[in-house]
Image (cartoon, rainbow, N blue to C red):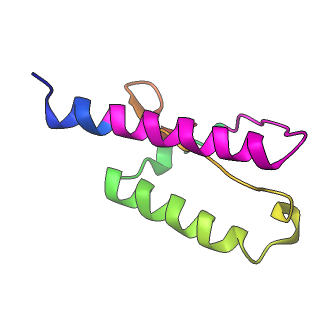
Amino acid sequence: RLTLRQFGSEENFRRGEALITALLARYARLNVVRLDLGYLREHRPSVEQAKADLARLLNNHRHNEIFHSVVGYVWHLEWAFQSGYHWH
């Protein structure tokens, strides 16, 4: 029996696969970049603040020239004792 968390994880994985498949069908070449975003030890946010920060980044990227060639993205929020909340 799947828990809600497992279901959400599997659904997110399925949606990520669908996005990648659609992008590969549309574009002849893609560059995949892994970006790790974290916080300094003295500025560790709550999970709510980490999610709000990512939402702000994604909203701002629409208006920033350096992101003009981004055609898709997948984010994953993690928490670790040493580093706190961080995004991949």
Question: Magenta span: helix, strand or loop, mainly?
Answer: helix
As drawn, is 87 to the left or to the right of 9?
right
In terms of depth relative to the viewer, which is nearer, 53 or 61? 61
In terms of depth relative to the viewer, which is nearer, 66 or 81? 66
- Quadrant where the image shows the N terminus: top left
Q: Residue 38's spot in the image, x, y percent?
A: 57, 41
Task: Judge whether 43 appears above or below 31 on screen.
Answer: below
Q: Residue 42's spot in the image, x, y percent?
A: 48, 46
Q: Quadrant of residue 12?
A: top left
- Quadrant where the image shows the C terminus: top right
In terms of depth relative to the viewer, which is nearer, 69 or 25? 25
Residue shown at the point (40%, 52%) measured from the top left: 45
Task: Judge whether 18 appears above or below 47 on screen.
Answer: above
What's the magenta region? 9-35
In this view, the residue farthest toward the front is 25
Q: How many marks?
A: 0
As drawn, is 2 to the left or to the right of 12?
left
Q: Is residue 13 magenta?
A: yes
Q: Residue 32's spot in the image, x, y percent?
A: 78, 35
Q: Is residue 14 magenta?
A: yes
Q: Residue 77's spot in the image, x, y percent?
A: 45, 40
Q: Is residue 52 visible from the viewing direction of this image?
A: yes
As drawn, is 29 to the left or to the right of 1?
right
Q: Quadrant of residue 50?
A: bottom left
In this view, the residue farthest toward the left is 1
In terms of depth relative to the viewer, which is nearer, 15 or 76? 15
Residue shown at the point (34%, 34%) measured from the top left: 9
Task: Judge whether 58 appears above or below 85 on screen.
Answer: below
Q: Is residue 77 visible from the viewing direction of this image?
A: no
Residue shown at the point (47%, 43%) measured from the top left: 15
Residue shown at the point (48%, 51%) measured from the top left: 43
